[in-house]
Amino acid sequence: LSLHDALPISDGTQICWQNITVTGTWGASGNVFIFSSSAAGNWAAAFAAQPTMAAFNSSPTSGYFWTAANGCTVTDFAGVSLWRAAAAGATTNTVGIIAIGRYF
């Protein structure tokens, strides 16, 4: 399996995943710092209906942060938002995206 792939299961469940690299500057938002990216991508295979999607930090050397997926459709996803507790300048982060849904 690669870093951008799909796993169809015979019961109709499909799991797709992909790593994306996002670069940007962290901005203060209350007591945390936020970084939003519109880096979008396509699933390796289309879903029959909108899947459930999650994002996670897959580059721990870039500092500890929390991630959230910005939404998706049956063929693509819309980007991610990242939060961290400490200020940082411009950084490059690798974020893992995963979706689970139905392919039939």
Image: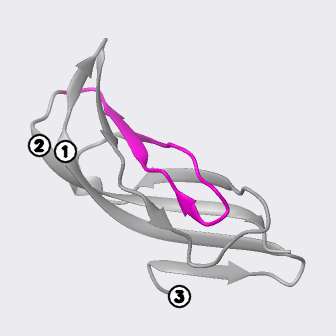
Q: Is 26 or 32 nearer to us in this picture?
A: 26
Task: Look at 29% across and 54% down and name the residue there.
Answer: 60
Determine whether label 1 and label 2 are within 8 Å by CB: yes
Image quadrant assignment for residue 87:
top left
Name the spot of residue 67 as percent of width and height, x first.
43, 42
* Residue that label 3 marks: 1
Q: Which amino acid type is shown beneath numbered disc 1?
A: Gly
Image quadrant assignment for residue 33:
top left
Q: Secondary structure at mark 3?
A: loop
3 relative position to 76: left or right: left
* Residue that label 2 marks: 90
Name the spot of residue 68 as percent of width and height, x first.
48, 41
Magenta residues (range) = 66-86
89 relative position to 14: left or right: left
From the image, state whether disc 3 or disc 2 is nearer to you: 2
Q: Which amino acid type is shown beneath numbered disc 2?
A: Ala
3 or 1: tag closer to the N-terminus: 3
* Scheme by which the image is coloured: one colour
Q: Secondary structure at mark 1?
A: strand
Task: Look at 57% across and 51% down and name the residue there.
Answer: 54
Up-down: is 2 above or below 78?
A: below
Name the spot of residue 95 as percent of width and height, x first.
38, 57
Name the spot of residue 5 as percent of width and height, x first.
54, 80
Determine whether label 3 and label 1 are within 8 Å by CB: no
Task: Look at 61% across and 71% down and name the residue there.
Answer: 16
How far apart marks 3 and 2 lie (CA) works out to 32 Å
Residue 59's tag is: none
Up-down: is 63 above or below 100?
A: above
Up-down: is 3 above or below 67?
A: below
92 relative position to 37: left or right: left
3 or 2: tag closer to the N-terminus: 3
Q: Considering the image in quadrants, where does the C terminus appear?
A: bottom right
